[in-house]
Image: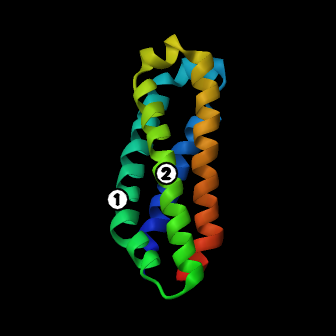
Amino acid sequence: MNIKDLKRQHVEITKSSNYILDNVDKATVEKNVHEIVKSINTVSGKLKIHLLSEDKYLYPHLLESENPKLNLFGKNYYEEMNKFSPIYEKYKSNYNTASKIKDNLQKFNVDTEQVFKLLMDRINREEKELYPLLD
């Protein structure tokens, strides 16, 4: 299975996610709120494409695999993303404009740390645990 596109998508998602995480403190958010909103929307779009790619190509490959380890990865990762997707969607709808962030700055900071920790942990596990099995 060719996972080059999935890896490229991880790099793009990580870059925008890191920008958001690097600018979470109050002073930086107020100064860069429009760029943060742009990055949230960028991550949202790239994540949507990435998840569609996984649903169409990766998970069927894993779930149909005769390799029990790959099969288990497929089941576990699919279930995990089904739990994460609504969390991210709620985050995105709560903070997809500058005014929503400014009106809830403290909650934005907490939610951002939590949501992006989940996302980055997932990407790191895919890169370290799953993708080496598929190369």
Q: Amino acid at mark 1?
A: Leu
- The one of 81 and 53 positioned closer to us in this rendering: 81
Q: Quadrant of residue 44?
A: top left
Q: What residue did someone put label 1 on?
A: 52
Q: Where is residue 73 shown, x and y percent of the image?
A: 56, 71
Q: Quadrant of residue 57?
A: bottom left
- Of badges 1 and 2, the one in the foreground is 1
Assess disc 2: are there few (<14), some (14-19) or many (≥20) residues with their C-alpha within 10 Å of its C-alpha: many
Q: Is residue 83 left or right of residue 48?
A: right
Vertical order, 108 against 122 (above or below): above
Q: Quadrant of residue 4?
A: bottom left
- The one of 104 and 17 positioned closer to us in this rendering: 104
Q: Is residue 55 left or right of residue 124?
A: left
Q: Where is residue 59 shown, x and y percent of the image?
A: 42, 70
Q: Amino acid at mark 2?
A: Ile
Image disc number at residue 109 = none
Assess disc 1: are there few (<14), some (14-19) or many (≥20) residues with their C-alpha within 10 Å of its C-alpha: few
Mark 1 vs mark 2, CA separation in Å: 14 Å
The residue tagged with tag 1: helix, strand or loop? helix
For this orientation, the residue located farthest to the bottom is 66
Q: Residue at x 60, y 80 (%)?
A: 69
Q: Where is residue 63 shown, x and y percent of the image?
A: 44, 76
Q: Residue at x 45, y 66 (%)?
A: 6
Image disc number at residue 13 = 2
